[in-house]
Amino acid sequence: MHRSLTIFIAVVWFVNGFICKILNLVPRHEEIVARILGGEHARILTIGIGVAEVCMAFWVLSGKWRRTCALLQIFTVASMNILEFILVPDLLLWGRFNILFAFLFIVVVYYHAFGQQWKTPKTQSV
């Protein structure tokens, strides 16, 4: 289960970063950035955010500093979604309901890092 959650979390970051933002296959992401941070540099800022999300995907896959990584993910997802909820709900895929999906993702990330101790079961010696 741990490996499946690791892959799921990494895929979420990778798809949002690379597919949606860097390749701009979901232009709504750039529109959100333009509305919140200004339109003049929206494309380059969107690409920068996408690169950071791709890096997050690789960090998740690496397993290094898992709890620090989880805390950064939780902070990032919460802050981005609160800002979007307040400032640009009309541009969100599910409007203000996006915050529900963000919360569920935060719960998964928290559980992955803190919820269960991921230890390999010890075999009994005979």
Image (cartoon, helix red, strand yellow):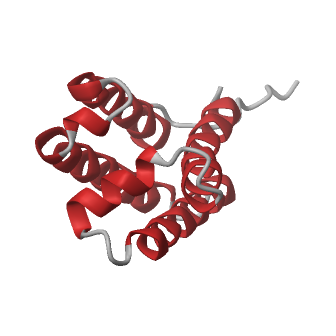
Q: Position of residue 89 (x, y in %)?
A: 21, 35
Q: How many marks?
A: 0
Q: Going by the picture, which residue comes out furthest to the right?
A: 126
Q: Going by the picture, which residue comes out furthest to the front?
A: 40
On the rendered structure, is 93 left or right of 75? right
Residue at point 54%, 44% (across, down): 26
Which quadrant of the view contains residue 51?
bottom right
Q: Position of residue 92 (x, y in %)?
A: 32, 35
Residue at point 62%, 45% (across, down): 15
Q: Depth check: 123 or 116 in front?
A: 116
Residue at point 25%, 69% (across, down): 38
On the rendered structure, is 61 left or right of 69? right
Which quadrant of the view contains residue 46?
bottom left
Q: Position of residue 9 (x, y in %)?
A: 56, 40
Q: Is residue 96 above or below residue 80?
A: above
On the rendered structure, is 93 left or right of 119? left
